[in-house]
């Protein structure tokens, strides 16, 4: 009897303890077991992140698995950055600091609301957003600008006034001294105005021209040049070189559209030209970067080639180059990178060759005298034939020397150091499969002309 009565009593106490534990868990969520993702960002980690931001928890660094944590506590009275709540995100509350944090689980689409939210963040004048939040917005804008649906993004960008907002962003505060900001904004403009070859639809080129024209009308090119002057003083820091590359890529893509370039005022053309030459001098004198250096040279030389090929009202003229050592600066910049181990870069030589040809066709050397032609340009093409005879042929080096001979005289051309011996080497290379037959034939024609 006694034992039969004790057993139900024990079961009752056990059931009671289970019920008590369940009740405690429901009334005190902090005692419940945290999900895996929450434990990844525990209170300890959050404190550490806040200290990295100067004692204020703002935005966390990328989390394992590619997720990014963003604080929204300081944005309660302002537009939420990029869809603060939707199916793409997971909200987590820190038990220690009692603030919402958002983990982005996948990339956001280029919707009108998302584009507007990103532009609102970079346009904020009250400094409510952290640098990381601004960078996140700019990176999203850059990703959308590079997407296959660039047309829709550019249309939205124009409708939302994105171009003047970009320019104002760079001109506000210390943005021009920040290579990250400069690089991202320049890259967005460069992607929007890039002329795509192949099967690109005409509507893409039309919207790209609208972006380029709006950028010029709003003074964006001058803003880019100002940024170039303020933050680049030489050196080979990677972040600086990347930003410099983006600046000249954006300027080059804008003026590569002839209808836009022809409408640029001559004073702006000269500003671009002077800054391009100044940048080449800085690169030549202080830079030893053999990775980014050639890429930047191609961008700057492309800009010079465009400026020397537009309408007479906006184009460079002979007087613009007189007394500025323009051609010596171009060749010195190329040699500078090769001297530090960069080696021959066919794209660099090809681009600067086109600039020289444009200047020749515009009679720069006939008007300003033959000194630059004899001392700099002709030796450049002789060296070009030595380094890469086939590429030199494709860029018209042999034809250029023949035409230059008519200007300065065949006798003076034949006296140029190395020209005769180099032509002979190309013709005698019967066993050299690297030199094409058409290159040898062109060398033969030029040699016959000079003799």
Image (tube, grey):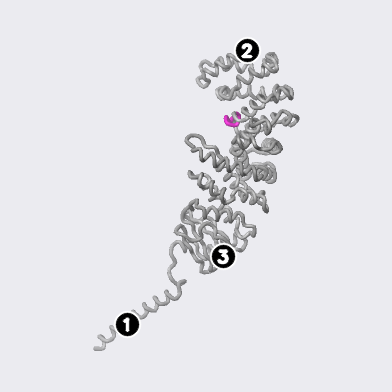
Q: Secondary structure at mark 1?
A: helix
Q: Is residue 376 magenta?
A: no
Q: Which mark is residue 312?
A: none
Residue 288, given in percent of the width and then of the height, sits at 64, 38
Q: Nearer the viewer, mark 2 or mark 1?
A: 2
Q: Main secondary structure of the magenta part?
A: helix
Task: Name the residue that disc number 3 marks.
Answer: 76
Residue 18, given in percent of the width and then of the height, sits at 36, 77
Q: Secondary structure at mark 3?
A: loop
Which tag, 2 or 3, sits closer to the chain's start? 3
Q: Nearer the viewer, residue 146 or 212?
A: 212
Residue span colored magenta:
344-349
Q: Are marks 1 and 3 in contact (CB under 8 Å)?
A: no
Q: Which residue is rendered at x = 36% and y = 81% of the image? A: 16
Task: Name the residue that disc number 2 marks.
Answer: 449
Which tag, 1 or 3, sits closer to the chain's start? 1
Q: Is residue 347 magenta?
A: yes
Is 344 located above or below residue 188 in the figure?
A: above
Task: Name the residue that disc number 1 marks.
Answer: 12
- Residues at marks 1 and 3, CA–CA distance in whole angstroms: 50 Å
Around disc 2, counting alpha carbons within 10 Å, would you say few (fewer than 14), some (14 to 19), or many (20 or more)? few
């Amino acid at each position: 009897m006694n034992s039969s009565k004790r057993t139900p009593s024990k079961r009752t106490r056990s059931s009671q303890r289970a019920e008590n534990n369940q009740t405690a868990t429901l009334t005190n969520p902090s005692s419940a077991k945290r999900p895996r993702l929450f434990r990844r960002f525990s209170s300890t980690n959050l404190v550490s992140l806040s200290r990295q931001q100067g004692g204020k928890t703002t935005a966390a660094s990328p989390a394992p698995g590619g997720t990014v944590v963003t604080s929204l506590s300081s944005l309660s009275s302002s537009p939420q950055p990029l869809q603060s709540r939707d199916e793409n995100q997971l909200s987590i509350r820190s038990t220690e600091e009692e603030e919402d944090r958002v983990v982005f689980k996948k990339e956001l689409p280029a919707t009108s609301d998302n584009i507007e939210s990103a532009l609102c963040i970079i346009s904020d004048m009250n400094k409510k957003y952290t640098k990381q939040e601004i960078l996140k917005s700019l990176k999203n804008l850059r990703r959308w600008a590079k997407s296959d649906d660039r047309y829709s993004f550019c249309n939205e960008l124009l409708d939302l006034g994105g171009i003047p907002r970009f320019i104002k962003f760079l001109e506000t505060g210390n943005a021009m001294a920040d290579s990250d900001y400069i690089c991202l904004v320049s890259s967005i403009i460069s992607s929007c105005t890039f002329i795509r070859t192949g099967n690109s639809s005409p509507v893409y080129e039309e919207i790209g021209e609208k972006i380029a024209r709006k950028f010029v009308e709003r003074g964006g090119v001058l803003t880019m040049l100002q940024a170039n002057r303020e933050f680049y003083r030489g050196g080979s820091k990677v972040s600086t070189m990347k930003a410099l590359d983006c600046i000249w890529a954006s300027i080059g893509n804008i003026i590569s559209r002839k209808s836009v370039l022809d409408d640029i005022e001559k004073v702006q053309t000269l500003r671009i030209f002077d800054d391009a030459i100044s940048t080449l001098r800085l690169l030549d004198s202080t830079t030893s970067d053999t990775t980014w250096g050639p890429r930047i040279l191609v961008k700057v030389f492309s800009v010079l080639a465009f400026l020397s090929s537009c309408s007479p009202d906006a184009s460079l003229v002979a007087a613009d180059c007189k007394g500025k050592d323009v051609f010596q600066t171009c060749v010195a910049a190329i040699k500078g990178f090769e001297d530090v181990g960069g080696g021959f870069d066919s794209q660099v030589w090809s681009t600067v060759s086109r600039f020289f040809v444009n200047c020749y066709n515009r009679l720069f050397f006939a008007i300003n005298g033959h000194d630059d032609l004899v001392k700099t340009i002709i030796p450049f093409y002789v060296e070009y034939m030595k380094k890469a005879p086939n590429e030199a042929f494709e860029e018209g080096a042999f034809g250029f020397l023949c035409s230059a001979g008519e200007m300065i005289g065949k006798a003076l051309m034949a006296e140029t150091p190395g020209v005769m011996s180099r032509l002979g080497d190309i013709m005698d290379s019967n066993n050299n499969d690297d030199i094409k037959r058409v290159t040898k034939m062109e060398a033969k024609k030029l040699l016959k002309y000079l003799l």
